[in-house]
């Protein structure tokens, strides 16, 4: 019962109802409709019948009176009776009207009955309630005619079993039925429409209740318990709005970031960008510079505030700036979008000595129509120089290795040819081979040291080193070159020299490099002086020459790997650019230092300071810069 | 007897080639760089120049250009180089009718090469 009521409630609300309920409602409705219609019709019939009976009885009574008033001969009387009966039957619906004299039917609307015995006519005995009998009152004025007329003359009326319905009653029933059908149709229509609108009404209801929360929580507006077409569309709309909301938030964040980039001053992001050593330029579009950091402004030679009003198409700059601007203009396509680009800029063309920048143009893919890009400018001079120097080094090393090899080979071939048996010549061959072999092996040691230094795997085997012996051997090693150029090599040593802790072979390399340089870069008939001093905590070796000297601007550079002084007089001598680099590394490994005093044209003095004993507590300083 | 000019700033090379070539009977003149070589050339007739490529003052290429400028177009020139980046000069030197030879070299082969050049120059 409860479920029926709840189903009924849902039905009225035009919601989903169980099929059985729907069918039962339809059945009940139809049954009710039929019942009402039948009742109506039956009621109408009853009323009609009752009315008829009343009227008919009265009319029949009147007829009986009239019948009784008929005079004349029996023949005539019968004819009159028939006439009257027929008249009556034409206006009042009766089944049969007959007049009986007790023993036989005298007159009747049914002609076949006339003369028959009334008791034998079946319709008299059956349906007693539907047959009325009226006594004919005879006229008392003519006693003569009262012959056989007795009180037994009767009028018998047999009522019809079915009365036609009054037009009025059937009309009422028809109208009632029509109205009920219309109501039913209306209700069904109402239900269908209600169903369609249900989704909309839920939405309206939800909006009403949750409208104040739209701003924070769009999802509250979703409707999850209904699933018709309108509600689905609504939910999709909510989702779409959420997405738009998310995009709007992201755009807001991006706009904030752009704003941060734009504002120069105490903003932490632009501070960070200004601290970056690379130049960074943010270009919003071809007519607007978004941000230029300090490094970029410096490279381009711009005032940091001036760029705000500059346009790419019209701005001018000098030096590197003009090359940067030109590259940007070249990268700009006709549709305002930048192409990705990278380029080396060396305005003066002299990559070896000038600053070279690598420029990256990085279009921002966010919105290709905008023509937004970021430009990065990085100083790659060091890298370029190192790469160039490394190439030069390989070339130079090949040449330097081949020179002693040429001599060794030529003199060895001379010996092995057997053509020259002059003992002086033979001795000369052996000498040259020996000397050049030593030169070659020292060069190989230098190269080996350089690669060890690059890898960081140089290791010192420490021992007591007698500096005097070291220096004397070093001078002897270069005596050949000294003799060739007629350079006077002097050893100025004190009588007492303390030994130091160091790697003997490596220190020999240092001395050989310094002496070799001194002789190489000194003209003929020059002088090289090797000195030695000691203090209480260190020793100082000096190698002083009166050769071509080194410009102070190049003092730092010549100690760099593969670097030589950019001085034509120096470059005319063969060199690999690793001698001083190796020497300094070795000295630093000994916790010492090398210093230089020199001016162009007035010789050079190299000073090597070494502690008596390198400190074990500190790790060796690696100068792999 | 043919006169050969040997030019190199490395005295050992000059010496060893002098030994070999004088053994062949050639007369040997020497110089330490391109400028000295030109002085020797101006002083007397030379039949072949054997020179190092890398020398101070005036290098092998400069010497070659100077020799051709002086109209000595038939003088055979052999240039020795130890550098690996000078192979491209070989084509350039063809213009000057000079030959490039690598260092290290085998003296006997160089002597043969010199002999062939002198023979060709003498017969043409």
Image: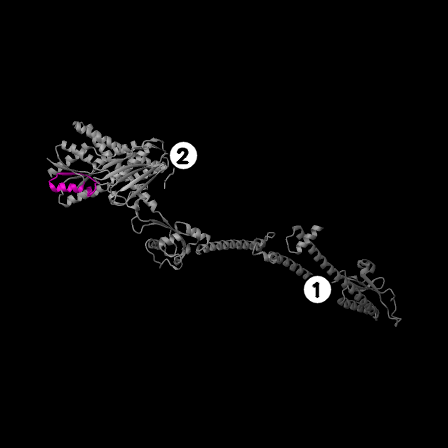
The residue labelled by disc 1 is A171
For residue A135, side relative to residue A300 (left or right): right
Q: Quadrant of residue A330?
A: bottom left
Label 1: chain letter: A
Q: Earlier in the sequence, mark 1 or mark 2?
A: 1
Check if mark 1's residue and mark 2's residue have beta carbons within 8 Å. no
* Residue A138 sits in quarter: bottom right
Which type of secondary structure does the marked residue at label 1 adopt?
helix
Q: Residue at x 37, y 49 (%)?
A: A378
At which x and y percent is residue A173?
71, 62
Q: How would you rate the neighbour count of disc 2 (Cα within 10 Å): few for under 14, some for 14-19, many for 20 or more?
A: few
What label sits on residue A37 in the rendered view? none
Q: What percent of the width, then of the height, locates residue B30?
A: 15, 37
Nearer to the camera, A261 or A425: A425
Disc 2 chain ID: A
**Residue A568: quarter of image:** top left
**How far, Cα to Cα, is label 1 from label 2?**
129 Å
Q: Is residue A162 left or right of residue A484?
A: right
Relative placement, left or right, of A173 versus A316 is: right
Looking at the rendering, the stretch of residues picked out in magenta corresponds to B33-61
Q: Within the magenta stretch, is there residue B120?
A: no
Q: What x and y, as percent, mark residue A98?
A: 80, 64
Q: Are marks 1 and 2 on the same chain?
A: yes
| Residue named by callout 2 | A616
**Neighbourhood count class around disc 1 (C-alpha, 10 Å): few under 14, some 14–19, many 20 upward:** some
């Amino acid at each position: 019962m409860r479920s029926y009521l709840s189903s009924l409630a849902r039905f009225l609300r035009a919601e989903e109802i169980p099929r059985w309920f729907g069918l039962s409602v339809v059945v009940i409705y139809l049954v009710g409709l039929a019942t009402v219609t039948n009742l109506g019709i039956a009621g109408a019939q009853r009323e009609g019948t009752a009315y008829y009976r009343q009227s008919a009885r009265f009319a029949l009574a009147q007829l009986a009176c009239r019948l009784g008033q008929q005079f004349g001969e029996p023949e005539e009387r019968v004819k009159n009776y028939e006439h009257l009966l027929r008249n009556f039957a034409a206006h009042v619906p009766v089944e049969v009207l007959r007049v009986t004299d007790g023993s036989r039917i005298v007159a009747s609307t049914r002609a076949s009955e006339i003369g028959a015995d009334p008791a034998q006519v079946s319709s008299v005995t059956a349906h007693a309630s539907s047959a009325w009998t009226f006594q004919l009152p005879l006229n008392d004025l003519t006693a003569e005619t009262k012959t056989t007329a007795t009180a037994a003359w009767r009028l018998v009326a047999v009522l019809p079993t079915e009365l036609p319905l009054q037009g009025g009653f059937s009309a009422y029933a028809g109208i009632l039925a029509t109205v009920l059908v219309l109501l039913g149709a209306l209700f069904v229509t109402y239900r269908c429409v209600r169903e369609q609108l249900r989704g909309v009404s839920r939405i309206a209801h939800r909006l009403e209740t949750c409208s104040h929360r739209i701003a924070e929580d769009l999802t509250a507006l979703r409707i999850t318990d209904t699933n018709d077409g309108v509600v689905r569309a609504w939910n999709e709309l909510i989702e779409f709005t959420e997405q738009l909301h998310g995009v709007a938030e992201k755009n807001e964040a991006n706009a904030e970031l752009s704003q941060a980039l734009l504002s120069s001053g105490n903003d932490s992001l632009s501070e960070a960008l200004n601290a970056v050593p690379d130049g960074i330029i943010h270009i919003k579009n071809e007519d607007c510079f978004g941000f230029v950091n300090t490094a970029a402004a410096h490279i381009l030679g711009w005032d940091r505030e001036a760029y705000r009003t500059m346009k790419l198409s019209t701005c001018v700059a000098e030096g590197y700036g003009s090359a940067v601007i030109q590259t940007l203009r070249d990268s700009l396509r006709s549709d305002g979008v930048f192409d990705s680009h990278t380029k080396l800029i060396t305005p003066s063309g002299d990559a070896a000595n000038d600053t070279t920048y690598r420029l990256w143009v990085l279009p921002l893919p966010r919105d290709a129509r905008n023509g937004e890009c970021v430009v990065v400018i990085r100083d790659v001079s060091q890298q370029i120089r190192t790469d160039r120097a490394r190439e030069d080094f390989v070339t130079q090393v090949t040449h330097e290795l081949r020179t002693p090899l040429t001599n060794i080979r030529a003199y060895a071939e001379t010996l092995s040819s057997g053509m020259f048996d002059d003992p002086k010549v033979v001795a000369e061959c052996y000498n040259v081979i020996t000397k050049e072999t030593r030169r070659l092996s020292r060069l190989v040691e230098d190269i080996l040291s350089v690669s060890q230094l690059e890898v960081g795997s140089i290791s010192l085997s420490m021992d007591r080193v007698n500096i005097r012996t070291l220096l004397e051997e070093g001078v002897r090693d270069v005596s050949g070159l000294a003799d060739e150029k007629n350079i006077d090599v002097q050893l100025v040593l004190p009588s007492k020299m303390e030994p130091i802790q160091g790697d003997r072979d490596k220190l020999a390399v240092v001395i050989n490099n310094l002496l070799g340089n001194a002789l190489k870069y000194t003209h003929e008939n020059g002088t090289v002086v090797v000195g030695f001093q000691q203090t209480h905590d260190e020793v100082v070796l000096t190698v002083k020459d009166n050769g071509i000297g080194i410009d102070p601007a190049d003092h730092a550079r010549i100690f760099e790997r593969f670097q030589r002084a950019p001085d034509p007089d120096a470059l005319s001598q063969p060199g690999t650019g690793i001698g001083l680099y190796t020497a300094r590394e070795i000295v630093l490994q000994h916790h010492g230092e090398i210093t230089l005093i020199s001016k162009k044209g007035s010789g050079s003095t190299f000073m090597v300071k070494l502690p008596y004993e390198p400190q074990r507590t500190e790790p060796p300083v690696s100068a792999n810069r | 007897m043919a006169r050969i000019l040997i030019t190199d700033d490395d005295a050992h090379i000059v010496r060893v080639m002098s030994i070999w070539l004088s053994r062949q009977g050639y007369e040997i003149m020497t110089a330490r760089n391109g400028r000295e070589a030109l002085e020797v050339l101006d002083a007397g007739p030379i039949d072949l120049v054997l020179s190092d490529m890398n020398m101070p003052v005036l290098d092998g290429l400069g010497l070659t250009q100077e020799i051709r400028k002086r109209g000595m177009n038939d003088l055979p020139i052999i240039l020795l180089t130890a550098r690996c980046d000078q192979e491209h000069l070989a084509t350039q030197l063809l213009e000057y009718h000079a030959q490039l030879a690598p260092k290290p070299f085998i003296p006997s082969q160089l002597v043969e090469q010199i002999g062939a050049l002198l023979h060709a120059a003498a017969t043409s």
